[in-house]
Image (cartoon, rainbow, N blue to C red):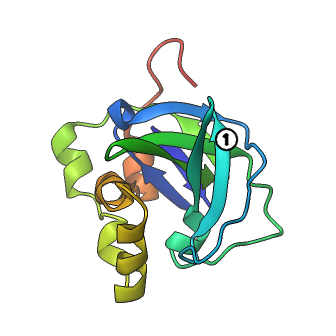
Amino acid sequence: MVARVGDQTVAVEVALVSEAMRPLPIRAGDALPSFVLGGAVIRGQELPVVDLHALLGGGADPSLDHRRFVVVHAGQGSVALQVDAVLGVRRLPRGDLRRLPCVFARADASTAEGLGRVDGLASVMRELRLLPDPAWAASGPPPAGRP
């Protein structure tokens, strides 16, 4: 699945994604890492909501209309990633996806520590890839019936 975060494109294996949805109300929490906005009740469970703007070093941008949550499997539970737009599902050879830069590799020490404080989030971030525009364009059209 491919999503847009500010001027960056990110990709995660679709097998890790349980759903993409409009954002739900977020309840702020105490002592959370700076990139965790709080929790949202999704399908009866409160899930942490991660602001990918902040995680990717851009900080939260209040002028942008954060339009989607992408709910991904993380450890024993799930986490909602807040993105600007879901661009769709594209086929990329697994080896090509693995060669792309990992979001986690860009994390500084405090961010990496914060990732470890949210159950399973570090493993998700190891799977989340930055997708350069040439790779995105080369992925071709979406499969039939997909955006």
Residue 143 in view here: yes
Quadrant occupied by the N terminus = top left
Q: Residue pushed farthest bottom?
A: 109
Q: Residue at x 54, y 47 (%)?
A: 3
Pick whichever, 107 or 146, lies toward us.
107
Pick whichever, 51 or 97, lies toward us.
51
Amino acid under disc 1: Val
Q: Residue at x 38, y 33 (%)?
A: 14
Q: Quadrant of residue 78?
A: top left
Q: Position of residue 129 (x, y in %)?
A: 36, 56
Quadrant occupied by the C terminus = top right
Task: Indicate left or right for 32 with 100 as reference.
Answer: right
| Residue, disc 1 | 41
Pick whichever, 37 or 94, lies toward us.
37
Q: Position of residue 105 (x, y in %)?
A: 29, 73
Residue 7 in view here: no
Q: Residue at x 74, y 57 (%)?
A: 27
Q: Quadrant of residue 104?
A: bottom left
